[in-house]
Image (spheres, helix red, strand yellow):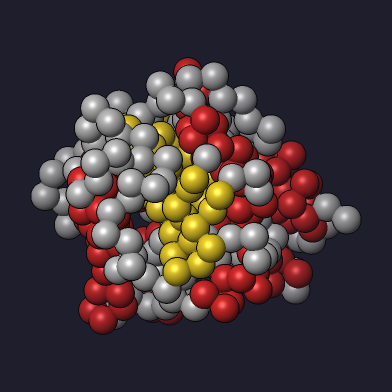
Amino acid sequence: MKILVTGATGLIGKALLPHLNHDEITVISRDPARAYQLLGHHINALDSLESLPNLDQFDAVINLAGEPIMDKRWSEQQKHIIEDSRWNITQQLVDKIKASDTPPQTFISGSAVGIYGNQHDKTIDESFTIEPNNTDFSQQVCSRWEQIALEAQSDQTRVCLLRTGIVIAKQGGALAKMLLPYQFGVGGPIGDGQQYFPWIQLQDMVRGILFLLNNSDTQGPYNMTAPNPITNRAFSAALASTLHRPHLLFTPAWVLKCALGESSQLLLDGQRALPNKLQAAGFNFTFPCIEQALNQTLGD
């Protein structure tokens, strides 16, 4: 299979690429030399999509590109960077798919459970109706991102949308940022701890993408979240237990709002998102429970 991948040097991309080693892989990277260093010289690395007039040569496209949403405070400039890093490359891919005589049969494109907004303890799956004209920034980003990706859908191309939760991985992502206070014995819940924490272990995330890639009857949005979402308080307790550290201190919401501004909503809001559609298609999770996931990720 000939596959085009964007965002291949990110957390998920780096974990995914080794599982595609029997395929012919082309990656889009602003720094091809770094891509070769991280991913190996068996790939073909391009610095942009401009050299490709269309995508006739590819069987599938996996679009994982996007500026990390939590790395910096959400200034207006940073918001534009977050938007452009998702919307622009997705639009370019869609335009080239539509310009193809024999377009890729599969287009898998990123999104996030943030598209649902803050739903408190309401259980939600892919059938949940998303309100139009919302003012939540992460909802706006994801809604537009999905709208663009779906423009590629046709009788020749199926589109799968990855509504991703918080990826549990030691080597990066949200968990890596959470570890430090626990290692110093001052970890604990965020805010009141009652917000739901939709998570997925990195190995299951990769397996889920491969499942969608290899099952031609899948299309539309998929919650890439474990089947047992938990509250932030329960996650904090499980993390402390795994690390053999105390679980005593709360981080008040006002502290986060002062420190992070608007982006604090990513930690203070939650979605009790279930992967009903993925499971109905036949996918089985290796790590359905947070204790298993943390032990696998952080265990000695």
Of residues 254 and 274, the one drawn nearer to the viewer in this rendering: 274
Residue at x 76%, y 60% (from the top left corner): 246
Q: Quadrant of residue 205?
A: top right
Q: Quadrant of residue 43?
A: bottom right
Of residues 152 and 135, the one drawn nearer to the viewer in this rendering: 152
Q: Quadrant of residue 6?
A: bottom left
- Vertical placement of 171 versus 210: above or below? below
- Vertical placement of 297 versus 123: above or below? below
Of residues 141 and 160, the one drawn nearer to the viewer in this rendering: 160
Residue at x 29%, y 39% (from the top left corner): 102
Give x and y (percent) for residue 240.
73, 56
Residue at x 61%, y 71% (from the top left corner): 36
Tell me if residue 236 can be seen: no
Give x and y (percent) for residue 207.
60, 38
Tell me if residue 298 can be seen: yes
Of residues 231 and 32, the one drawn nearer to the viewer in this rendering: 32
Side of 37 where 101 appears, left or right: left
Give x and y (percent) for residue 193.
51, 52
- Vertical placement of 106 versus 253: above or below? above
Q: Quadrant of the C terminus?
A: bottom right
Q: Number of marks in the image?
A: 0
Residue at x 25%, y 64% (from the top left corner): 88
Q: Residue furthest left?
A: 133
- Vertical placement of 217 versus 86: above or below? above
